[in-house]
């Protein structure tokens, strides 16, 4: 078996058939399709039974997308793994193009591609003429992958990865509910694995109102957790992680300030200062904390626009 396609699904009865169909319409045929129902309660399991004999449906108690993907990884027989979120869609040539790339580049562990991000469920008729995800972003790949990954994510539905590389890295972290894909990719990079980019739009990602990434502060805080883990595991990515962590702590502090959480604001300012102890940002931030609105906000805006970080301690 060349490729194992893994779809984790939770309460997506109205969309899962479309995701499955986009896999079954692939021009590449040497694949198995594993769909892991993460304890759905809306009829998703019944919808899977109607998807035909080409899929292998697995079921588990509700433990999250990472646990569902890991069950798929444990069951998979493919040389390569490809993951599709249950509300996303693939273009028919997606598997073929990425298999071809990995076959031709044995030194690469993971290849990802471009795609479109759309609002809502309906795929627009003019999709092909719309700007793609990486049209205005720098895709992570090659020697620049670690730095770019910190500012531009690799979307899980966009990637294909060697099965052995994922298993050696330990699969997906099941205690993370956001950024579990970035956590896995960081572990691959820490191990010296190469990441490549295929500049072709092969995926349609739906940006739905109930998506986890809609929760901005939680999104930032989970990002900090993932970055800290990498920082503590290995020194390999420290030159990239230190300035990224400083920026993430600033973003968290800013969000908490806007929420009138002064204590949280101060904690993240201190965390950023420990990473860059010579920075003047902490005393300026403290001054901003004492000033009446909106003058304090003006100080913070200026604070957030200043310079880059240099190495220090991790809080």
Image: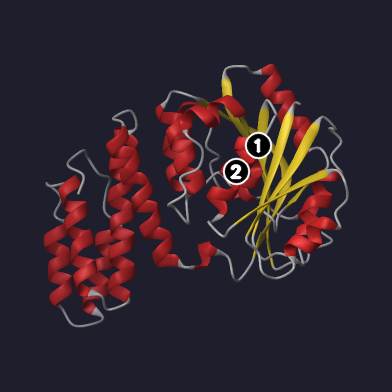
Question: Can I make out residue 61 in this image?
Answer: yes
Q: Residues within 10 Å of mark 1 (few under 14, many from 20)?
A: few
> Residue sitting at 35 percent across and 45 percent down?
227
How many marks can you see? Answer: 2
Taking 6 as reference, is 50 above or below it? below
Q: How is the image coloured?
A: secondary structure
The tag on residue 180 is none
Percent coordinates x, y for residue 248 in the rendering: 33, 54
Quarter of the picture containing the N terminus is top right
> Residue sitting at 30 percent across and 38 percent down?
231
Q: Nearer the viewer, residue 267 or 136?
A: 267
Q: Is residue 305 left or right of residue 41?
A: left
Question: Can I make out residue 91 in this image?
Answer: no
Percent coordinates x, y for residue 23 in the rendering: 80, 45
Report the Cα–Cα distance between label 1 and label 2.
6 Å
> Residue sitting at 42 percent across and 44 percent down?
150
Q: Is residue 145 left or right of residue 98?
A: left
Percent coordinates x, y for residue 168 in the rendering: 49, 27
Taking 30 as reference, is 64 above or below it? below
Taking 71 as reference, is 215 above or below it? below
CB atoms at circles 1 and 2 under 8 Å apart? yes
> Which residue position holds label 1?
75
Taking 294 as reference, is 40 above or below it? above
Q: Is residue 79 left or right of residue 188?
A: right
> Which residue position holds label 2?
71
> Residue sitting at 65 percent across and 36 percent down?
75
Q: Identify the secondary structure beneath mark 2.
A: helix
Q: Identify the secondary structure beneath mark 1.
A: helix
Q: Residues within 10 Å of mark 2 (few under 14, many from 20)?
A: many
Q: Is residue 149 left or right of residue 221?
A: right
Percent coordinates x, y for residue 131 in the rendering: 69, 53
């Amino acid at each position: 078996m060349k490729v194992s396609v893994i779809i984790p699904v939770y309460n997506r009865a109205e969309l899962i058939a479309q995701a499955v169909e986009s896999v079954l319409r692939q021009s590449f045929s040497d694949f198995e399709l594993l769909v892991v129902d993460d304890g759905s309660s809306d009829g998703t399991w019944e919808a899977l039974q109607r998807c035909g004999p080409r899929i292998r449906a697995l079921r588990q108690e509700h433990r999250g997308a990472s646990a569902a993907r890991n069950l798929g990884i444990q069951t998979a027989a493919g040389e390569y793994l490809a993951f599709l979120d249950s509300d996303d869609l693939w273009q028919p040539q997606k598997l073929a193009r990425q298999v071809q790339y990995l076959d031709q580049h044995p030194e690469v562990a993971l290849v990802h591609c471009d795609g479109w991000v759309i609002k809502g469920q309906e795929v627009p008729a003019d999709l092909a003429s719309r700007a793609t995800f990486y049209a205005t972003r720098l895709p992570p790949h090659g020697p620049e992958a670690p730095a770019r990954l910190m500012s531009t994510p690799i979307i899980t539905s966009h990637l294909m990865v060697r099965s052995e590389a994922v298993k050696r890295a330990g699969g997906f972290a099941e205690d993370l509910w956001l950024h579990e894909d970035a956590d896995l990719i960081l572990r691959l990079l820490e191990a010296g694995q190469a990441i490549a980019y295929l500049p072709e739009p092969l995926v349609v990602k739906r940006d739905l109102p109930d998506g986890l990434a809609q929760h901005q502060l939680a999104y930032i805080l989970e990002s900090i957790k993932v970055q800290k883990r990498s920082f503590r595991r290995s020194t390999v990515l420290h030159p990239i992680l230190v300035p990224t962590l400083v920026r993430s702590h600033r973003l968290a502090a800013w969000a908490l300030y806007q929420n009138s959480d002064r204590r949280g604001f101060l904690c993240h300012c201190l965390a950023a200062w420990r990473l860059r102890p010579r920075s003047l940002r902490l005393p300026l931030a403290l001054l901003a904390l004492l000033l009446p609105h909106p003058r304090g906000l003006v100080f913070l805006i200026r604070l957030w626009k200043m310079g880059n970080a240099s190495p220090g301690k991790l809080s």
